[in-house]
Image (cartoon, rainbow, N blue to C red):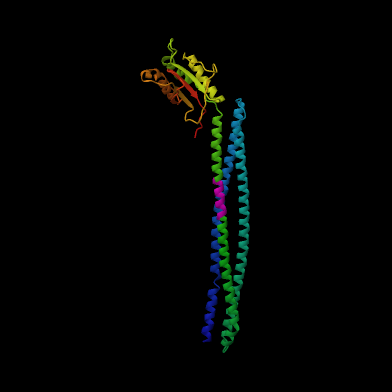
Amino acid sequence: MYGTYFLMKLTCLTSALSHDDAITALKTARGAIEQSSDRWSNILIGSTAIVAVGVVMEIVAEAMEVRKDLNEGKRFEPFHLIAFIAAAVVALFVAIEGVAELKVASRETDLRENNSAEQQELQVSANDAKQTADNATSEAVALAKRVGGLDALVAQTNGKLDQLTATATDQKTRSDALIASLTKKQKEVDATIEGAKKQVAALAASLSTINNLRQQLHEQGVFRTLTKSQADKLGPFLKEKLQPDPKTQLPALGVGAISDTEAQAYGMQFLKLFKDEGVFVYPTPNGDFPRGIVQLEATKYGLVLAIGPNGADRSHAYEPFIGLLKVMGSVGLEAAIEIDPDLKFGQGQLDIERKPIKE
């Protein structure tokens, strides 16, 4: 009976002290966590580098554009300053992100060193426990060979067996706790990486918005121009279809513009073209300048051809204006058309409105 009990205790001890499997599982879990962390860390560093390159390219491009405008005699526009400030903001947040990545890498290195030390300590303790168990087994076998010494052997080794069993159980508990701690730390690192990825995406979206705004501001700063090609195609139509009757001085065509330097300068180009081609331009309050108009809301084209009230017996008088609208559209000068009750029969007016913003 005592021999059977003794062998059962040895079997339980051997099962509890299978520390090699626990250590192997711990190393495997630790290696998998470190591999995953390294992969996401590399992705994060690569994303930051791409954003940094984009910011540098943006600043260089903006500087080249400002230099080009200044060389052409243009003044330094406010949107240039906005673009530089925006690039500086992006650069600042990229720098902050770089510091955060260094902090995360430093904390992760400390965590790995601490876990490695704990694992080493755990392995040493487990080896000591195994060595103690081996020694106790050897002593038990030697004592068992003595005649009549089995009862004494069981009584002597019961305490050691219980102590070793408790030690092995404690080591397993510590191993489980360490694996749980590593898993928790990995989740925290993953959450940090995910947050950094969202910041990179937000910065990229902000940079895109800033670029679009800068482009719109730049386009608004460029004056519209009636090109020579457009003027050459409009000229023959004006000479053929909009020549005034000597008696009635009809049809007549005026030019209006809002109180804006760009619109007035654009209107002057049309005014000169009409006069050069023999169109009767009816007098305006500003003499040779476009008539002043008021724009209440933004329009799609920035050009409106207004004509006077039309009657059933006078529809032929407005055919030249309809033809002019078509020719303008064919050369890229799209314009809307509307009826203006303030204009007289046979009169038309090309209104130059604010330059539309491209989406």
Location of residue 291 in the rendering, given as x and y in whole percent from the top left corner: 52, 20
Q: Which segment did they paint magenta? A: 190-201
Residue 151, placed above or below residue 88: below
- Location of residue 234 by image quarter: top left
Residue 354, placed above or below residue 39: above
Q: Nearer the viewer, residue 267 or 167?
A: 267
Seen at 57% across and 70% down, the residue is 173
Residue 219, placed above or below residue 16: above
Q: Is residue 228 left or right of residue 55?
A: left
Q: Nearer the viewer, residue 162 or 4?
A: 162
Asked if the stretch drawn in magenta spans residue 228, the answer is no
Q: Nearer the viewer, residue 247 or 177?
A: 247
The residue most toward the left is: 313
Location of residue 107 in the rendering, given as x and y in whole percent from the top left corner: 62, 56
User: Overall secondary structure of the magenta stretch?
Assistant: helix
Location of residue 319 in the rendering, given as x and y in whole percent from the top left corner: 39, 19
Q: Is residue 237 left or right of residue 100?
A: left
Q: Nearer the viewer, residue 21 or 257?
A: 257
Asked if the stretch drawn in magenta spans residue 199, the answer is yes
Location of residue 309 in the rendering, given as x and y in whole percent from the top left corner: 42, 21
The residue most toward the top is: 247
